[in-house]
Amino acid sequence: MSKPLPAVDFLKIPDQGDPYLEGHKCGACGSIYLDAREVCSKCGERGKIAATRLSNDGHLYVFSVVYRSFPGIDVPYVSAIVDLEGGGTVKGNLIGIEPDPAKIKMGMPVRVVYKDALGRKDREGNSYLSYFFEPR
């Protein structure tokens, strides 16, 4: 059986070890981006950006409970933006908690978990691996 495909470019699935999220960090100012780039958008330095492994721990920055979506997408679900420890801000779905705003707290500690991408497959039948956030 083949290993799953990453659902996004910044999700890395090594042959050995656990999956992880990869960012790109500016060596001059420390800004972190999810996409590869040559020039830092914050300080303007060129050629000082290198790939870095992002933390699996973070804190909920903001969220929205989604009640309407495309056909085939189960609702409600929690769309979240998380500030990762050590830098990096990532959007994803918050799982493992009831989609009730009264039970979700801004700043709550969360962890990145890696799971099947909700049963999605490519045309050849290969599955995808995605990342989600869950409360710590």
Image (cartoon, rainbow, N blue to C red):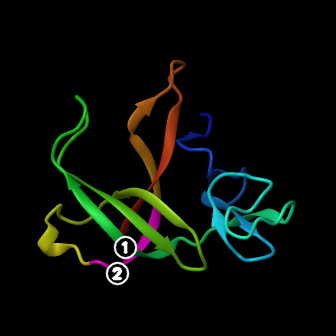
* Along the viewing direction, whichever of 64 and 134 lies nearer the viewer: 64
Above/below status of 99 relative to 61: above
1 left or right of 89 in image? right
How many numbered markers are drawn? 2
In the picture of the structure, the residue carrying the numbered disc 2 is 107
Residue on which the image places disc 1: 60
Amino acid on which disc 2 is placed: Gly
Specify few, some or many for label 1: CA neighbours under 10 Å numbering under 14, 14-19, or 20 or more: many
Give the mark, 2 or 1, whose residue is nearer the N terminus. Answer: 1
Separation of marks 2 and 1 at Cα, in angstroms: 5 Å
**Res. 3 image quadrant:** top right
Name above or below for residue 109 compared with residue 127. below
Q: Residue at x 72, y 67 (%)?
A: 25
Say which residue appears at 72% left-offset and 52% top-offset. Answer: 36
Q: Judge whether 33 appears above or below 15 on screen.
A: below
Q: Which one is nearer the viewer's eye here, 89 or 46? A: 46
Q: Residue furthest front?
A: 44
Q: Position of residue 110 (x, y in %)?
A: 39, 74
Q: Residues within 10 Å of mark 2 (few under 14, many from 20)?
A: few
Q: Residue at x 43, y 68 (%)?
A: 82
**Residue type (three-letter) at the residue carrying disc 1:** Leu
User: What's the magenta region?
Assistant: 106-113
110 inside magenta stretch: yes
